[in-house]
Image: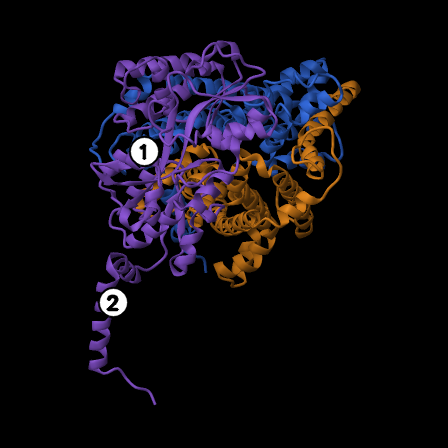
């Protein structure tokens, strides 16, 4: 007999799980449904099938510009965050030093700061230092926000890698950079990619902080926010919403599956 | 064979230029000075008035000055503009509203315009022109304008009186919208019969604030973007709203039975004012831009596309509804006895804090 | 040839820490300075003063608004934890073979755009929205009487926030349940405990760190929320974060008060994090 769940219990919980998943996906499905609906207002009854909204969004230069801008900001900030995250992870995992709890606390602190507070603090900071607001300031803010996520992904993976591998490399005469480049890095590539993707999707979607430090160019969430308050372009926005959400679902799920497969292949060779 | 310029040639050229300048007169001098102004004109304006949709407003300027095309930065409101100016941004022109004319005129940040350089100036509404003056100088060129009145569904709402009090009517809980601006305190002051709603004492402000706080639970939405208002009003979430003339036009277009009511305590009128920053290196270009903005063509475009009134008396909207609700036939509509023109609020910082407290309460 | 330890550590750690000090710690310090009026960006008189802080505590409004936001966040967090626990339990303890896949399916919506999910609810909840038009279409309600108080309300804000956070909160709870040693439950069963007793005496207490972590994950961001309230909250759904945002954007420059509000929020969040972190296990490298 199962100590955790009775048969009925399992059935009830499975039903609850299914219901919750339906509840989570239903609004997304509704957006999908209405993105093909031939009416400028998303409401029942349905008015017929059309791909016009997708065509409209594909032809909307502001919207496409915003998507591109967000992609650039996300790519830059994620690359930097992953780079800094790798450095931090190595220090946290491989090195001993007295201030480790304090360092970890600082590195993870951006996770708990409310974005409204961080946003205005950056606003004041850039005002005080005379840095004009621009995409660069958004990138800077996003690096801060996504750094903890990269660390949280990289540290467990680094922990899994046997330090003996590195010792062996040193014994064979490799310097620290070579050891890293040829031994450690290949083993953590899936985690690095994962970290990059998480940072990317976080930055791509981030509105709160960006709204305070962006200059005149619009990122996608900022475009979206103003579109939500100005509902005249709603159907196109729904179409782009569907595209972005489906794309991010596929990317995230695909990446996670890929990471598991890759890591299983690369192996951990760890004493547990 | 090339001929290089001799000293004689240069002297002849100089004489010719000087003579031409004298002959051409002040406008010619201006044009000559224009030749010295360079770079793109820096304009700080509200969203929708730059290259994000407002191109028609300054199309004539672009045609006449293709190498000095405007470059836009955006202001979300006058405080935002003020903050940006203090932070070091240096636009040539920006566009606050009439209530801020005195503030900016005395701030040292702006300089007066020279109406002689604006050929369309003579067609501008005199009452609005006067509103842009301070100490006899023309600090603001009137641009767009409109009213603050009450919009309501005549099929759902029976007002007890033609009064601002409809925004505070207990019978319509959850169906009322206010405007997100400290002017709500002014309106409260008007409703309470105060003598100077724009310059309330602490005690009076406390009364206005108390009224707003006590009635806030009736309010469904405090709107800041017109289209947000249209969406909520159009779908029936709202029956009563603090609104601008075009909001009535848009709701009527949706087939709703709506009334745009002038309260007996009098509506408020507002006028957008183009202002010229001090120390701008493109003074002449700025005047040319302003001239384009207040032309008849731009005026008509503004009325037909954004639903605001325009200061050029020759610009008439295509929509008869809009013309009616803007009281186009009455050039003194923005002042008494028809309405109170929005004006300087000496204690603006205090008003702002009180309003934020209302929103927080 | 190993690099000298201290040098290597400093170099490695130096970059990320420096980045955070410059772009995270210093900005917050500036907010603090602003709140004490030691620093200001406008040409006016200033000097150290507690005036803004005194105004904050003495005014009846700000603390009241904060409390309102706390209450809303508490409701959202409790609801989210109550919804997330059973699914985490199912995934971790029912012996289902594809638990990681199912977990991924559960979490995936969280990894899509937040704003877009708020958009979806805006589309659903309006008077003429999907939900109401469906009711009208199926005849459940007449066109004149839609279920009207859905959008622009406190309810809408809490519903959307709960919807957004449920997937994410399931994760720490799942982790703590997944790492539960089943032998403890078996031992309890051998000693005569029923499943319910096993749950209450063994599972629940051992999963509390995960629950605490999950609770914190949702409570902290929602207390300072301003995006969702501004889109679906209307007047009654207005939260503390909105006031901060307003003080920095629409109000006549009152950045002092805004900084005070922001710093107060940060202080509360920091205290909560410290207190709760005793109850959660933050796993770190040895």
Which label sits on residue B215? none
- In the picture of the structure, the residue carrying the numbered disc 1 is B127
Q: Is residue B234 visible?
A: yes
How far is mark 1 from mark 2, CA to CA?
38 Å
At a point 43% along the width and 29% down the height, the residue shown is B327
Q: Which residue is mark 2?
A: B20
Asked if B146 appears above or below A96 in the picture, the reply is above
Residue at 64% in and 22% down = C83
Q: Is residue B259 shown above or below B291?
A: above
> Is B125 situated left or right of C273 in this image?
left
**Mark 2: few/some/many CA within 10 Å (<14, 14-19, 20+):** some
Instruction: Please state the chain letter of the residue tagged with numbered disc 2 in the rendered image.
Output: B
Where disc 2 sits, the SS reads: helix
Question: The N terminus of chain C is located in which quarter?
Answer: bottom left
Which badge, 1 or 2, is on the more N-terminal residue? 2
Which quadrant of the view contains residue B337?
Answer: top left
Q: Which chain is purple?
A: B
**Does C55 sit above or below residue A181?**
above
Where is residue C244? Give x, y as percent: 40, 29
Residue C227 appears at what percent x and percent y? 50, 31
Tell which subunit mark 1 falls on: B
Position of residue C74 measured from the top left corner of the image (x, y, whole percent) = 52, 19
Nearer to me, B273 or A146: B273
Task: Please indicate whether residue B119 sits to the left or right of residue C135 in the image.
Answer: left
Output the letter for the chain in blue. Answer: C
Q: Residue at x 42, y 48 (%)?
A: A134
> Quick check: B271 left or right of C38?
right
Tag count: 2
Q: Colour of chain A?
A: orange
> Could you say which is closer to the camera, residue C215 or residue C159?
C159
Q: Nearer the viewer, residue C250 or C277?
A: C250
Using the rendered image, report if marks 1 and 2 lie on a common chain. yes
């Amino acid at each position: 007999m199962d100590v955790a769940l009775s048969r009925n219990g399992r059935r009830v919980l499975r039903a609850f799980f299914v219901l919750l998943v339906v509840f989570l996906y239903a609004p997304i499905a509704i957006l999908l449904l209405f993105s093909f609906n031939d009416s400028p207002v998303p409401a029942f009854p349905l008015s017929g099938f059309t791909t016009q909204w997708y065509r409209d969004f594909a032809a909307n230069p502001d919207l496409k510009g915003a998507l591109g801008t967000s992609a650039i900001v996300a790519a830059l900030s994620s690359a930097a965050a992953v780079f800094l995250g790798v450095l931090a992870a190595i220090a946290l995992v491989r090195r001993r030093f007295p201030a480790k709890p304090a360092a970890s606390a600082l590195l993870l602190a951006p996770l708990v700061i409310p974005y409204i507070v961080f946003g205005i603090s950056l606003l004041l900071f850039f005002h005080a230092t005379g840095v004009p607001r621009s995409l660069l300031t958004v990138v800077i803010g996003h690096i801060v926000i996504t750094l903890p996520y990269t660390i949280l992904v990289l540290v467990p993976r680094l922990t899994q890698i046997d330090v003996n591998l590195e010792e062996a490399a040193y014994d064979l005469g490799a310097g620290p950079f070579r050891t890293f480049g040829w031994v450690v890095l290949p083993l953590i590539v899936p985690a690095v990619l994962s970290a990059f993707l998480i940072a990317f999707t976080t930055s791509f979607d981030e509105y709160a902080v960006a709204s305070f430090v962006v200059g005149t160019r619009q990122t996608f969430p900022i475009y979206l926010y103003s579109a939500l308050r100005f509902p005249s372009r709603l159907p196109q926005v729904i179409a782009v919403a569907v595209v972005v959400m489906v794309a991010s679902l596929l990317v995230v799920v695909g990446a996670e599956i890929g990471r598991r497969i890759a890591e299983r292949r690369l192996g951990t060779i760890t004493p547990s | 064979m090339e001929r290089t310029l001799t000293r004689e040639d240069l002297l002849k050229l100089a004489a010719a230029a000087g003579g031409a300048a004298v002959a051409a007169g002040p406008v010619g001098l201006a044009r000559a000075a224009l030749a010295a102004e360079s770079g793109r004109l820096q304009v700080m304006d509200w969203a929708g008035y730059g290259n994000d949709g407002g191109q028609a407003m300054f199309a004539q300027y672009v045609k006449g000055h293709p190498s000095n095309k405007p470059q836009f930065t955006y202001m979300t409101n006058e405080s935002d503009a003020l903050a940006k100016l203090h932070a070091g941004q240096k636009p040539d022109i920006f566009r606050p509203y009439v209530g801020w004319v005195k503030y900016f005129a005395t701030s040292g940040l702006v300089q007066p315009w020279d109406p002689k350089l604006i050929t369309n100036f003579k067609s501008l509404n005199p009452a609005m022109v006067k509103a842009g003056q301070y100490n006899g100088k023309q600090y603001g060129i009137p641009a767009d304008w409109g009213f603050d009145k009450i919009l309501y569904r005549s099929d759902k709402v029976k007002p007890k009186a033609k009064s601002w009090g409809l925004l505070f009517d207990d019978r319509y809980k959850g169906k009322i919208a206010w405007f997100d601006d400290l002017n709500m305190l002014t309106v409260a002051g008007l409703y309470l019969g105060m003598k100077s709603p724009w310059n309330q004492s602490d005690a009076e402000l406390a009364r206005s604030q108390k009224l707003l706080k006590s009635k806030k639970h009736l309010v469904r939405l405090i709107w800041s973007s017109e289209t947000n208002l249209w969406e909520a009003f159009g779908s029936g979430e709202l029956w009563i709203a603090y609104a601008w003339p075009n909001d009535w036009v848009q709701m009527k277009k949706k087939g709703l039975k709506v009334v745009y009511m002038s309260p007996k305590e009098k509506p408020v009128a507002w006028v957008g004012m183009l202002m010229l920053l001090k120390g701008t290196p493109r003074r002449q270009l700025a005047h040319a831009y302003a001239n384009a903005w207040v032309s008849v063509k731009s005026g008509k475009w503004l009325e037909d596309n954004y639903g605001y009134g325009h200061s050029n008396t020759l610009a008439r909207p295509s929509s008869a509804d809009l013309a009616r609700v803007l009281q186009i036939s009455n050039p003194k509509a923005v002042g008494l006895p028809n309405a109170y023109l929005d004006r300087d609020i000496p204690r603006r910082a205090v008003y702002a804090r009180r309003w934020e407290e209302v929103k927080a309460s | 040839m190993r690099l000298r330890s201290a040098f290597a550590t400093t170099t490695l750690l130096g970059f990320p820490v420096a980045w955070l000090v410059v772009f995270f710690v210093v900005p917050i310090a500036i907010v603090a300075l602003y709140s004490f009026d030691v620093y200001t960006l406008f040409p006016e008189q200033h000097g150290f003063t507690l005036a803004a802080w005194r105004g904050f505590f003495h005014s009846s409004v700000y603390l009241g608004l904060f409390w309102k936001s706390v209450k809303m966040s508490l409701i959202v967090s409790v609801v989210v934890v109550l919804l997330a626990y059973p699914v985490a339990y199912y995934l971790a303890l029912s012996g289902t073979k594809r638990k990681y896949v199912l977990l991924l399916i559960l979490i995936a919506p969280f990894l899509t755009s937040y704003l877009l999910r708020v958009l979806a609810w805006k589309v659903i909840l309006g008077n003429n929205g999907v939900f109401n038009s469906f009711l009208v279409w199926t005849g459940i309600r007449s066109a004149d009487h839609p279920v009207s108080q859905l959008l622009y309300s406190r309810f809408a804000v809490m519903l959307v926030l709960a919807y957004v956070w449920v997937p994410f909160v399931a994760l720490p709870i799942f982790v703590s349940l997944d790492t539960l040693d089943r032998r403890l439950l078996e031992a309890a069963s051998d000693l005569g405990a029923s499943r319910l007793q096993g749950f209450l005496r063994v599972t629940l207490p051992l999963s509390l760190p995960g629950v605490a972590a999950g609770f914190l994950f949702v409570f902290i961001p929602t207390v300072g929320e301003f995006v969702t309230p501004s889109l679906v909250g209307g007047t009654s759904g207005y939260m503390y974060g909105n006031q901060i945002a307003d003080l920095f954007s629409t109000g006549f420059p009152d950045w002092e008060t805004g900084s005070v509000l922001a710093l107060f929020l940060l202080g509360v969040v920091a205290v909560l994090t410290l207190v709760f972190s005793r109850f959660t296990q933050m796993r770190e490298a040895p």
